[in-house]
Amino acid sequence: EFEDIYVERRSDQLHFIRQSVHSPNHLPREVSRIGPGIIYSQWPIERTFGNIEEEVKQHSNAFANMTQRGI
């Protein structure tokens, strides 16, 4: 396994491995512990903010418009 070879389970070498390679190893345990990632992940909410921002027409008062759109 990549992590065993290059990281050797040492936290000081964890920067050698990308999150997209490392994170899936933890998914089964975390899903059983706290549920699917969409419930607690930051990415769905950031995507929602991006979608709302695209829909906002008046950029002069963008935050107020985003708040109104979110309601």
Image (tube, rainbow, N blue to C red):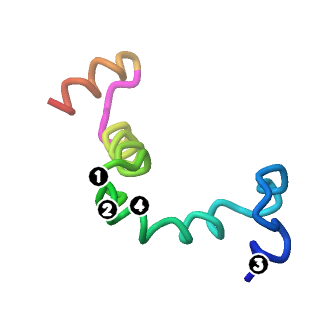
Task: Please give the residue where the numbered disc 3 appears in the rendered image.
Answer: 2
Residue beneath the point at 76% across and 63% down: 9
Residue beneath the point at 35% across and 16% down: 61
Q: Position of residue 43 (x, y in %)?
A: 43, 50
Q: Quadrant of residue 50?
A: top left
Q: Is residue 57 magenta?
A: yes
Q: Position of residue 37 (x, y in %)?
A: 36, 58
Considering the numbered disc 1 on the image, is that residue within a helix, a strand or a loop? helix
Of the residues under marks 3 and 2, which one precedes in the sequence? 3
Task: Please give the residue where the numbered disc 4 appears in the rendered image.
Answer: 30
Residue beneath the point at 73% across and 83% down: 1
Q: CA distance from mark 4 to mark 2?
A: 8 Å
Q: Amino acid at mark 2?
A: Pro
Task: Please give the residue where the numbered disc 2 appears in the rendered image.
Answer: 36
Q: Is residue 26 left or right of residue 1?
A: left
How crowded is the residue under tag 4: few (<14 C-alpha within 10 Å), some, or many (20+)? few
Q: Which mark is residue 39?
A: 1
Considering the numbered disc 2 on the image, is that residue within a helix, a strand or a loop? loop
Of the residues under marks 1 and 3, which one precedes in the sequence? 3
